[in-house]
Amino acid sequence: MSEEATTVRRLGRVERLPTRRIVLTALSLGVGAAVAYGSYRTLTLPAGARYSGSAWRDFLVLGIAQGAVYALIALGYTLVYGILRMINFAHGEVFMAGAFGSFFFADAWKESGFLDRRPLLAVLLLVLIAMAVSVTVAVLLERIAYRPLRGAPRLVPLITAIGASLFLQNTFRGLFGAQTRGYPKPRVLEGTWSILGIPVQRVQVIVLVVAGVALIALTLVVARTKTGKAMRAAAQDQEIASLMGIDVDRVIVTTFVVGGMLAGIAGVLFALTFGNISYFMGFAPGITAFTAAVLGGIGSIAGAAVGGLIIGVLQSVGPALLLTGIHVPSPFQLKDVVTFLILILVLLFRPGGILGTGEAEKV
Amino acid sequence: MSRLLEVSGVVKRFGGLAALDGLELHVEEGEIVSVIGPNGAGKSTLFNVVTGLYPPDEGDVRFDGRSIVGLRPHQITKLGIARTFQTVHLFANMTVLENAMVGQHCRTRSGVFGAIVRPPSTRREEERIREVARRSLAFFGPRLAGYRQEQPAFVLSYANRRRLEIARALATEPRLILLDEPTAGMNPRETLEMRDHIVRMRDELGLTVVVIEHDMRVVKGVSDRVIACDYGRVIAQGTYEAVAHDPQVIEAYLGRRAVG
Amino acid sequence: MRGALRPGARAGLVGGAVLVYLALVGMLVKFEELRLVGSQVTRGRLLLVLPPFAASFFAVRPRVIGGRVEQPGPGVALALGAVAGALVGAVGSVGLALVEAIGVERIRPVFVAVSPALVETLTFGRGAAAGAAILVVGGAALGAAGGIWRAIRHGLRRPVEVGLLTVVTLAMLQRIVPFMLDELRLERDWLYSRATRGLTWTGAVVVLVVATAAAAYVLDRRERRALAPAAEGRPEVRGWRRTALVTIAVVLAAALPQLAGSIVSEIMGTVGVFLLLALGLNIVTGYAGMLHLGFSAFFLIGAYAVALLTGANLVTAFGLVAPRFSADLNFYLALVLVVAIGAAVGALVAAPVLRLRGDYLAIVTLAFAQIAVILATSSWLQPITGGPQGLRDVTKAPLLGLEFRSAERFYYLVLAFCVLAVFVSWRLAWSRVGRAWNAMREDEQVADAMGVPTGRYKMLGFAIGGAIGALGGALFAVKVGTVQPGSFEIIQSITVLAVVILGGLGSVPGVVLGALVLLALPGLLSQLEEFRFLIYGAVLVAIMILRPQGLIPNVRRMRELREEERTQDAWQQIFAARQEREAAEEAAEAAP
């Protein structure tokens, strides 16, 4: 064309620099250095100011226990993402619903003494109730908010999910009040049990056992049953799956049911561990669990479990290890910062996660 | 003549599959080159590697004597390579004219300050963008003229979408244009029209053209040189006659057909 | 016949569930207090009327049967509507009966909204049996009305709906409008009753008639124009009408404090701050197409930056202290810096994560915002940020001897910046930059291949959005005079998102309207505050499902989303058809 002569077809030297790689390398070096420095300073503190070995052990056990809870919630994110490719932002509220639903029974049974008389049965019933409530919420959520949006651009269901999350939070606030409530615990579960010579909080033992059983059950269901096969097929390709005679809608509902069940279990375990509940309790664990799912590789069941445990441990050990040495006061205020930083770093460096299929990296 | 584009030893793997397996080819300035080959021969992958959408695993791509491996697509466009896509990718909700105006982006500079204050320089530039966009649309005569320019792109007919995509590429004022199956889905008359347009791109606009094409009438009508690919490699090149009678090429097509 | 009434039954049960929900979540009772028209129509009763009416309206919707749209005839509509409405009432009655059986005092510890007042509202103060009867019979009547309503021609229905909406709005604005009328020295007693504070019956009827007539006229004209061939030329060229509208809007906005007094100025000042945020978010999300869930971070940064730059004080156990780092700049100089800081933070924080896909990017923005809040609250940064107590004594933005803390003055300050931000948004939209964003939003890869440096333009979007957001934060700090981390929680980000989504992504007038509806209304309508976030959540869900283009769609997006609507309609038709089929199968099984 006539402007040939004026048209610039060169790139400046700066433009040719691989900016992204430089930024990422600098960032990873910076993070690595900060982690190394912080841990070094913490571990070389003078004996009086240092955490003892048993303190670290307690951090670790707490981390594993809360990690197991995160894993259960993370599975809900991962299962739904696997099939719908959507971040179910309201899943934290599904978890909250379970905890809240069981609370009233727990409270009444504490009063009547049932909780202390038959602790095992009571906790089992509480878990079942929480599962029922969470499943109800999850299924309603799918039916009302998500189903009309199948096939919509990716961000649309995410926005809907955020709206649903806010709606559910405030619904529970309106229904049951805004105050934080103490979640009763059977008396048997106070104190510690000695496991392999290590004293472990009894609640944490229960948490680990229940979470472990649930994880194994889920793995078996997905690997062995026909429903599980249908779920895996739909996760691969919904269209083809439906051509093969799989009712995709039903599979999706099943997925929400399974996610809801796990979230319900997690709700009771979380409430037992931390001892109180509120309508807002779903947010932080929800995001943390989502991080766990991404860290493990979203869409992968084993990934969610591994990611949950790692995040749990990092949350309980990380702030103390990294920040005490550089004299940051009350490092545990910053535990969510640790989570969020991990989320950002994982997405930057390995968006497919540890055990991911790499799907996330596809454009 | 000088070598405008030089692809040497390019390998691109997807999983275990090598879509390009040590591909070697070059394009002279002012040439019209057709790339043919059966489906899955790696033709579109070649375009994607040249335009920076995929980084090659091995090998080098040189444009006008300089390596362009590792550059981002927009940088490569700025250097003067424009392209169309096998499946039409327009900005469906922007108007036809706006689509073409986007093509001028890499040739203009005004930024946020210009947008807000609108000094005379920005106004002039905006006029120029509009002018170049209109001119590239006018390349297709009355097809994309008049009221159509204010319509959103998604209302266009299939053939017009293809034309608009090419017009958008022309609006980037390229030296080399890569056309990925420009006549796919067109009727015979439109196909012949497109054949003439491809020749005009060289003769009137002075462009170098590389075209992936399945319609042999088009290939025969436009090509200075034909390059046949299969399994990510060049299996034959030369005049249309020579390539069409090359036994390897015949086998690549007929052998597949016998199986399929 | 059983099959024919099925949609009515379904809608009735859903409506009943909604009624129970409204009761349990506490809305019915809270809303009861406000009288709208005369002493009979209260807001609570209006809310009570809605479920049966809406249920039947929905039950009688046109259906696609065998590829044809079929609208039930008036007789069927009446029957269906009545069934739906009666069922809504019946569900309510069952709920009432349960409450009576168990006892209010025993339910209350669980469902906090169940109270004698609720029972009173639901039974209209006439005891359980009579109340249940009223619910069922009234429900049926309302349902029948709803069914008939649907059967009325659209051109007739629409204006009346507008009329009713006008009446309700005027009635709800009973704290504001009478005051304005007084201020204008207009007679008001015919319209607003001094006893109930709501509208008088005469006033309501007059308003209804006038508004309906006006709406009929406007809608009719618009329809005719829509049928006429479209005018050519760019929207910008046809913009003189818009210029006139904008001028009128600005003049009205400028006159508002004089007309409406300081309560309104106070509320509108806050609305203005959030409008700035929404305009910033609109650039990131509406123009550049990146969902940002942590926009409150810019709000926080702006507020803290202006506080620290203009010499605010920390609250500590030993009284007020200067923070570890602070300057004592003039507010307007500081403002320039704050805007620059907002832009820089926006761009830098975004830089490494730009390649992420949209939904991941959104979550990362959320993570950043949370980090900002946690850090601002932490004991670690307490010497700078003041921790949970924050900073006090923020500047009053003195300019030529004027201070901007009073509601009216602040309103003008924020109005000026809003007008500026609107102007900037508009200019950007119709520029090379706006075009590049638009292309990127449509198809990032192709935009890149066509020469748009997408990474740079994403950063640019974040930077400009961040600058406007930080400006909002700075003004907020001036307004409140203190800066506390609690004001910048994630909920603020979602509020702003709801504003932009409701108004219409990428549409500046839409964003303004969204801010007025979601932020000004709850402030102006009493007792809505408590349900504000509940409503925001519902709005987000409802808009995404029913009207993803928002109230005032962006010119370009309108086209895009119409397409989406079409596909969505197709989906809904498929679902409807399937439900029909299932119903038929069930019916076949039931009658062998």
Image: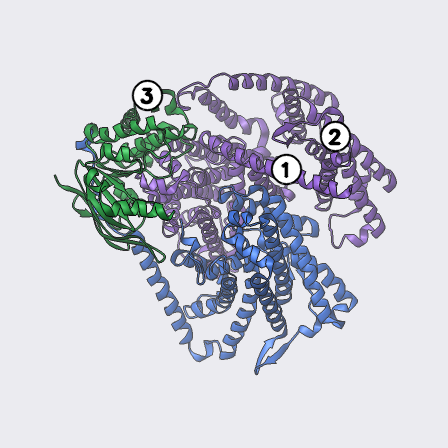
Chain colours: A blue, B green, C purple
Q: Chain of mark 1?
A: C
**Residue located 21% across and 46% down the image:** B236
Tell me the crowding category of disc 1: few under 14, some 14 to 19, or many 20 or more residues within 10 angstroms, Cα based: some
**Label 1, label 2: how far apart the Cα atoms are:** 46 Å
Task: Check disc 1 and report the residue beneath it.
Answer: C576
**Label 2, label 3: how far apart the Cα atoms are:** 69 Å
**Label 3, label 1: how far apart the Cα atoms are:** 44 Å
Reply above or below: A76 against C412: below
Residue type at mark 3 is Pro
Residue closest to the eye, C107 or A152 = A152
Residue type at mark 2 is Thr
Tell me the crowding category of disc 3: few under 14, some 14 to 19, or many 20 or more residues within 10 angstroms, Cα based: few
**Residue located 68% across and 42% down the image:** C582
Residue type at mark 1 is Ala
Is circle 3 on the same chain as circle 1?
Answer: no
Q: Residue C252 at what x, y percent from top left?
A: 52, 25
Say which of marks 1 and 2 sits in front.
1
Reply above or below: B62 against A207: above
Task: Check disc 3 and report the residue beneath it.
Answer: B142
Tell me the crowding category of disc 2: few under 14, some 14 to 19, or many 20 or more residues within 10 angstroms, Cα based: some
User: Mark 1 or mark 2, which has the lower sequence index?
Assistant: 2
Task: Check disc 2 and report the residue beneath it.
Answer: C196
